[in-house]
Image (tube, rainbow, N blue to C red):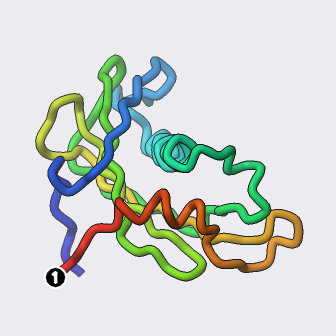
Amino acid sequence: MSRPQPPLRSEFPVFRAIGTRWMDNDAYGHINNVVYYSYFDTVVNAFLMESSGVDIRALPQIGVVAETGCTYFSSLSFPQTLEVGLAVERLGERSVIYRLGVFAQGAAQGAALGRFVHVYVDATARTSVPVPEVIRRAVSPLVIRTA
């Protein structure tokens, strides 16, 4: 399996600015790897709430994180402002696979490439359900077309 290439800004239809915090850095002076997952969670859920106009926490069907991953290409560090690009690799019947690119502000090439998978379940019973229509409408414009 070949290593992915750094993402390009042009691969993402939506961006969200993230301000780094002092505590995001690790002992080596760069943003700690676990912090990227917090960025992913923040960007995906903020996008869903803003674009759908609903509080996703109150829906009868919720997206739970079933998988995450990140490939790092270059270091970022506090006090940089980051821009996280968001796209949808796959919009399935019961899940959404997001692609996230983490960029230094204004950079054309990403420092990290993330994968974030939401699987939808009934909020009470936690049984598998289809992606809610309000979510499907919100993320459909983000689906990237592959050749």
The image shows residue 53 at horizontal and vertical percentages of: 59, 44
Residue 5 occupies which quadrant of the picture?
bottom left
Residue 36 on image: x %, y %:
44, 44
Considering only vertical position in the picture, is 43 above or below 137?
Answer: above
Q: Residues within 10 Å of mark 1 (few under 14, many from 20)?
A: few
Outermost residue toward the left?
108
Q: Quadrant of the N terminus?
A: bottom left
Q: Amino acid at mark 1?
A: Ala
Relative image position of residue 130 (x, y in whole percent): 65, 78
Query: SS of the residue at dot 1?
Result: loop
Rendering coords of residue 33 (x, y %) = 43, 44
| Between 50 and 62, the one nearer to me in the picture | 50
Judge from the rendering whether residue 7 lies leftward or rightward of residue 32; answer left or right.
left
Of the 4 image quadrants, the one containing the C terminus is bottom left
Per the image, the residue denoted by label 1 is: 147
The furthest residue to the right: 124
User: In front here: 46 or 116?
Assistant: 46
| Residue 34 in sight in this render | no
Q: Residue at x 79, y 78 (%)?
A: 127
- Count of picture labels: 1
Quadrant in the picture for residue 49: top right
Residue 77 in sight: yes
25 horizontally vs 94: left or right: left
Asked if 10 appears above or below 88 in the picture, the reply is above
Residue in the image at 40% along x and 30% along y:
18
